[in-house]
């Protein structure tokens, strides 16, 4: 596991383990992850906002033609909002989610359980997606992952896809969703996104994984692979999508600032000036944001 400059090892005392967390510029980050953004309340809020933007742009939580699924899994489920909604949409199904960080999930459970809005058919647990998934072979009718490009290095996709295939029953669906590079007429926002791309490259991450999803599924033995690409920010819901996209991108650029500065991708004065300009420009000029969903079926007979 590669360690980044801001990640300080916690001193060991006997059998004490290394802390899950590191700090940079007052922002908390996950040590054992290449995730390019902090893991704090501001990022959790942004991820939930982003969920509604993706749902609006795609016309729902999935492009897969599901028919009475019994068990579903969300890989590296983040705040858990996608599997919770799927559990509400399919009350007859058992829905699972796992992530290396359980804090957002546990907080959501505490908050929603008091109002009776937490679905009883959703279960989450702590696990690392870069290791063997803690589930049986062929357990799920539908296995899903979204936005893995923000934390999964390109050379590790095959092992994660292989695990997604392993835990999916023959004939079951596997879906991955990700973005392609957004574009905007805003010079400042474009410069900041180029800086973010530089940070992604430093960590071996794709600059948006959307273009690669179908190929990864096929390489993993998935059959009948289909790809659905939408460009958010235009069309019937363009105005509403623009509001959500701009809010999401500005929040991401704010959250990423301390890391861009610490890694010397940008100086602090340059970053702050660009951010001020982007905050003024983006709501005026807007942006477009391609989203790709690729899905297919685990074959009944494995090919060799």
Image (tube, helix red, strand yellow):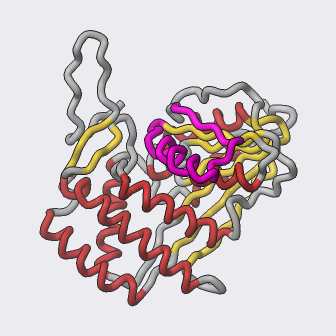
Spot occupied by residue 283 in the image (x, y as percentages of width and height):
39, 85
Spot occupied by residue 29 in the image (x, y as percentages of width and height):
31, 44
Magenta-colored stretch includes residue 109: yes
Image quadrant in which you'd find residue 258: bottom left
Residue farthest front in this picture: 114
Image quadrant in which you'd find residue 214: bottom right
Q: Residue at x 73, y 61 (%)?
A: 63
Residue farthest bottom in this picture: 284
Using the image as rendered, state which of residue 177 and residue 213 is in the foreground. 177
Task: Give the magenta part as a residue range.
Answer: 100-126
Image quadrant in which you'd find residue 158: top right
Q: Residue at x 20, y 22 (%)?
A: 11
Q: Residue at x 32, y 55 (%)?
A: 199
Height in image: 164 above or below 46? above
Magenta-colored stretch includes residue 56: no
Spot occupied by residue 145 in the image (x, y as percentages of width and height):
61, 48
* Left or right of residue 247, residue 22 in this image: left
Using the image as rendered, state which of residue 83 and residue 255 is in the foreground. 83
* Left or right of residue 248, residue 58 in this image: right
Mark yes or no: residue 6 visible. yes
Height in image: 122 above or below 271? above
Mark yes or no: residue 201 visible. no
Viewport quadrant of the C terminus: top right
Viewport quadrant of the N terminus: top left
């Amino acid at each position: 596991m590669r360690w980044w400059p801001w990640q300080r090892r916690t001193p060991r005392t006997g059998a004490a383990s290394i802390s899950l967390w590191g700090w940079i510029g007052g922002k908390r980050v996950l040590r054992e992850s290449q995730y390019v953004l902090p893991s704090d309340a501001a990022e959790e809020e942004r991820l939930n906002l982003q969920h509604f933007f993706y749902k609006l742009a795609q016309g729902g939580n999935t492009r897969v033609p599901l028919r009475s699924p019994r068990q579903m899994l969300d890989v590296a489920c983040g705040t858990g909002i996608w599997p919770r909604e799927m559990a509400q949409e399919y009350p007859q199904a058992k829905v699972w989610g796992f992530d290396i960080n359980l804090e957002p999930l546990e907080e959501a459970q505490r908050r929603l359980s008091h109002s009776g809005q937490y679905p009883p058919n959703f279960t989450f647990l702590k696990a690392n997606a870069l290791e063997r998934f803690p589930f049986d072979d062929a357990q799920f009718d539908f296995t899903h992952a979204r936005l893995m490009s923000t934390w999964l290095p390109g050379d590790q996709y095959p092992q994660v896809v292989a695990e997604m295939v392993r835990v999916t029953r023959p004939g079951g669906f596997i879906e991955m969703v990700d973005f392609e590079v957004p574009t905007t007429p805003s010079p400042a926002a474009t410069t900041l996104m180029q800086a973010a791309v530089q940070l992604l490259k430093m960590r071996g991450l794709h600059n948006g994984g959307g273009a690669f999803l179908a190929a990864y599924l096929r390489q993993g033995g998935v059959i009948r692979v289909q790809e659905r690409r939408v460009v958010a920010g235009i069309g019937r819901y363009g105005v509403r999508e623009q509001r959500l996209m701009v809010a999401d991108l500005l929040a991401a650029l704010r959250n990423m600032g301390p890391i861009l500065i610490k890694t010397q991708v940008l100086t602090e004065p340059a970053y702050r000036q660009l951010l001020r300009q982007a905050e003024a420009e983006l709501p005026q000029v807007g942006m477009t944001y391609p989203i790709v969903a690729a899905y297919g079926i685990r074959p009944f007979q494995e090919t060799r």
